[in-house]
Amino acid sequence: MLKSRGHEVLPLGNRKGEIGNQEIVTDWPKLVENLDTVTLYVGPQHQPPLYDYIFELKPKRIIFNPGTENNELVELAREKGIETEYACTLVMLSIGNY
C-alpha cells in the first residue's frame, strides 16, 4: 500500500522473502539518506538488537504497528527527537493520515 501511494519502500528483515513484488533486504544497508519513517512489524522482544541501527538511520518518526508497542524504544526515540506513534500504517494510509 505504501508503494501504491507513492512512497519509496525498503523492506528489511532477517529472512529472505518478498513483500508484494519487492524482495526483503537481509543485508541491511548502513545508511539510508533522508529517511522519513521506520514502520515496525517486529515484536518488542526482538527490537532491542535493532535500536542502534534504527537510531543510526535518523528517521523523523517510528510507527509501532499493533503488536510492536515498546515503551522503552519510544522513550529512547523521543530523547533523540524522533516522533513516535502507536498506529497501523495501513489504516493511516487508508484514511489519509500517514
Image: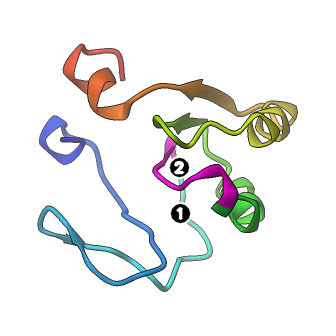
Assess whether residue 43 is covered by the magenta stretch: yes
Tell me where residue 91 sits by quadrant.
top left
Name the residue tied to disc 2. Answer: 34
Identify the element where label 1 is drawn. loop
Query: Toward the viewer: 21 or 58?
Result: 21
Assess whether residue 51 is covered by the magenta stretch: no
Of the residues shown, which amino acid type is indicated by label 1?
Answer: Val
Q: Which residues are magenta?
A: 35-45
| Placement of the C terminus among the 4 image quadrants | top left
Of the residues shown, which amino acid type is indicated by label 2?
Answer: Asn
Q: Position of residue 33 (x, y in %)?
A: 54, 58
Query: Toward the viewer: 50 or 98?
Result: 50
Residue 81 visible in the shown view: yes
Identify the element where label 2 is drawn. loop
Relative side of 45 to 17, left or right: right
Name the residue tied to disc 1. Answer: 32
Residue 56 visible in the shown view: no
* Residue at 83% across, 38% down: 80
Q: Mark 1, residues whose alpha carbon is within 10 Å: few (<14), some, or many (≥20)? A: few
* Residue at 68% across, 57% down: 45
Q: Are marks 1 and 2 in contact (CB under 8 Å)?
A: yes
Relative side of 97 to 31, left or right: left
| Placement of the N terminus among the 4 image quadrants | top left
Q: Position of residue 6 (x, y in %)?
A: 19, 40
